[in-house]
Amino acid sequence: MNRQVVLKLYKDILRYGETLRFTNKKYFRYRIQTAFRTNKDLSDETAINFQLQVITLLKREYCL
C-alpha cells in the first residue's frame, strides 16, 4: 500500500468535509481523523486493502 495514496484520500475527504452545509464540520473532521487513527497500525495487507476499498467506495458515493 502506498502511503501517498492513503494521504491523498485522507486529504480529499477532509476537503469534502469543508464543503458540507447541513452537518457539523468539526464533528465530521473528528470522525474522519478517528477512523484513520484507529486503522493506522494495520499491518495485514488484506485488512489494509479492505479498509481502502471501503473508504474509496464511500468517497465515490458521497464526495463526487
Image: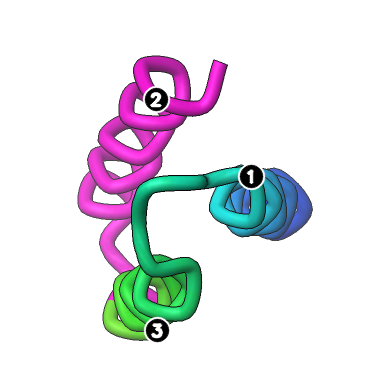
Viewer-nearest of discs 1 and 3: 1
Q: Quadrant of residue 42?
A: bottom left
| 16 to 17, vertically: above or below | above
Where in the figure is residue 29, as x and y percent of width and height? 48, 72
SS of the residue at dot 1? loop
Q: Which mark is residue 19?
A: 1
Q: Is residue 40 magenta?
A: yes
Rounded to the nearest whole Å, what is the CA distance between mark 2 and mark 3? 21 Å
Q: Can residue 54 be seen in this view?
A: yes
The foreground one among 14 and 10 is 14
Q: Which mark is residue 31?
A: none
2 vs 23, nearest the viewer: 23
Please tell me whether mark 3 sits on a helix, a strand or a loop: helix
Q: How crowded is mark 3: few (under 14 residues within 10 Å), some or many (20 or more)?
A: few
Q: Can residue 41 be seen in this view?
A: no
Nearer-N-terminus badge (2/3): 3
Q: Disc 3 designates what residue? A: 37
**Label whose residue precedes the other's in the sequence (2 or 1):** 1
Expressed as whole percent of the image width and height from the top left, the position of residue 48 reads 34, 52
CB atoms of marks 2 and 1 within 8 Å: no
Residue under pointer 2: 62
The range drawn in magenta is 39-64
Q: Residue 43, how many percent across, how many down?
A: 34, 71
Circle 2: element type: helix
- Left or right for 19, reference 28: right
- Front residue of 26/52: it is 26
**Could you tell whether 40 is left or right of 39 in the image?**
right
Give the Cα separation between the discs numbered 1 and 3: 23 Å
